[in-house]
Amino acid sequence: MPKDAFRDDVLRLVEEGAQLVEVLPREEYEEGHLPGAVNIPLKELDRESAARLRREEPVVVYCYDYL
Amino acid sequence: MGFERIYDYVPGKADWSASGLPTEGTLADVPTVGGAARRDVPTCGPSEKVAEARERMIATRWDRCVVVNGERVVLGVLREKDLALSYSEASVESAMRNGPATFRPDEPVEKVAKRMRERGVSSVLVTTSDGKLVGMLRREETEWPDPARD
């Protein structure tokens, strides 16, 4: 179960080496994303697509806003 | 999926951009009000005296002073006009204009400039999504020569 995180948490986690994952569609990711984030659109998120992420490091997932 | 530490950045990309933090992507180079806003606008606290704010405005050659609390959250704005109508010993809080309109740092300059022209506004405040002051955007910072015009 993911833990809720807010901006300050994300800044701290990134300093600790966290991987950022934007789950929005590719076009939205290409227009703008957090520095260093990778794109795994929600519809494509499965065991295979997640295999590119390092399991030992924290992972921060985000979309556009609260909704 | 077997990850040990997984987090959901709940307020998401909108919160990140609106706080003025950098982004990457094809639209990252579009000029934003966060980049164009003047960060040297003077500030004062609500309990300071009008005379103190006036001195600061004269020293910094600004005709505005942004009223903020200890966490730089914007409470109001003091204009030259407001000073003229107030006693020197009055508090800034009693003289300021409450609840000024604000824009987020990730808004494109072009869009905000258009709204400023339409409303005849000479300056607007730029704040983060949690209300903290980023700076003040004056109309002259939005009016660049159009290279396509010549």
Image: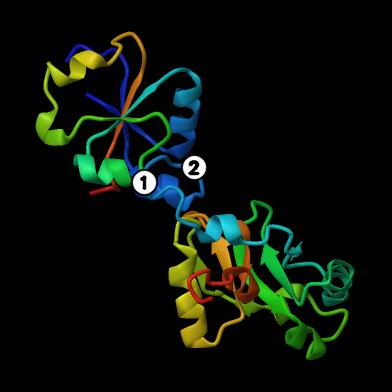
In this picture, is B149 found above or below B35?
Answer: below
Residue found at the very far front of the displayed protein:
B150
Q: In this view, does B38 lie to the left or right of B121?
A: right
Q: Is residue B131 above or below residue B124?
A: above
- Identify which residue, B31 or B104, lies in the foreground: B31
Of circles 1 and 2, which is in front?
1
- What residue type is disc 1 on? Thr
Quadrant hosting residue B138: bottom right
Read off the chain for label 2. B
Please provide percent x and percent y for residue B77.
Answer: 66, 74
Q: How crowded is mark 2: few (under 14 residues within 10 Å), some or many (20 or more)?
A: some
Q: Distance between the residues labelled 1 and 2?
A: 13 Å
Q: Where is residue B90 in the image (x, y as percent from the top left)?
A: 82, 79
**A35 displayed left or right of B69:** left
Name the chain letter of the residue that bears numbered label 1: B
Q: Which residue lies furthest to the bottom in this view?
A: B85
Element at label 1: loop
Name the residue carrying label 1: B26
- The residue beneath circle 2 is B22
Crowd around label 1: few <14 · some 14–19 · many ≥20 (10 Å): some
